[in-house]
Image (tube, helix red, strand yellow):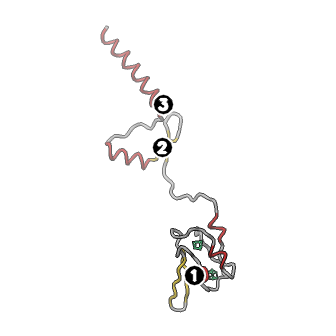
Amino acid sequence: MTYFQVNKKCNGCLACLQNCPANAIDVKDSGTKRKLLHNMARCARCGNCWRVCPEQAIEFQHMLTNQWDEVVELDLIRCQVCEEPLYTSAFRETLAGKTGTSETPLCSRHKEALTLKFNAHFAGYKSGQTR
Ligand code: SF4
Ligand code: SF4
């Protein structure tokens, strides 16, 4: 979605460009065409362009839209016991590439429970050995 939107009422007068304090609006005249350009990285969302536009051509409301844009979707790995979200499979690959190991996906609670169980089992095995 483009946040800065200009509707069909625009007549290309350039009042918006001339009154933009951030140089966020530009114009490109090429052949028989005039194009208005907008740079969101420069824009301060001050609304000056909207105020000065004599044609009510700037749809400034889109600049004020309070919404979250989905930017990426990744595969999620959950705890094998309780299904608590842990990390993404891509992150797991990154870690595996750096450490050369790949752990069983368990949340800290279940990892701890498994360690305690393992330790108890190991202690029992050791005491059985000494008898
Ligand atoms: S001020 Fe309004 S009519 Fe003029 S160029 Fe800008 S958007 Fe178009
Ligand atoms: S909102 Fe302000 S900074 Fe952004 S384009 Fe309009 S006049 Fe320029």
At label 2, which amino acid type do we have? Ile
Give the residue displayed 56% in from the left and 81% down from the top.
36
For the residue pair 28 and 117, the one nearer the viewer reads as 28
Query: Element type at marker 2?
Result: strand
Side (left or right) of 16 relative to 120? right
Q: Nearer the viewer, mark 1 or mark 3?
A: 1
Residue 12: name its quadrant: bottom right
Number of the label disc, if any, that sits on residue 77: 2
The answer to whether the residues at label 1 and label 3 have Cβ atoms under 8 Å apart is no
Q: Which quarter of the rendered image does ligand 2 occupy?
A: bottom right
Element carrying mark 3 = helix
Q: Residue furthest top?
A: 131
Residue identifier under label 1: 18
Q: Earlier in the sequence, mark 1 or mark 2?
A: 1
Tell me where residue 116 sits by quadrant: top left
Compared across the picture, whether 49 is left or right of 81 comes to right
Q: Earlier in the sequence, mark 3 or mark 2?
A: 2
Mark 1–mark 2 Cα distance, whole angstroms, equals 52 Å
Residue 28 coordinates in the image, percent (x, y): 51, 84
* Residue corresponding to mark 3: 110
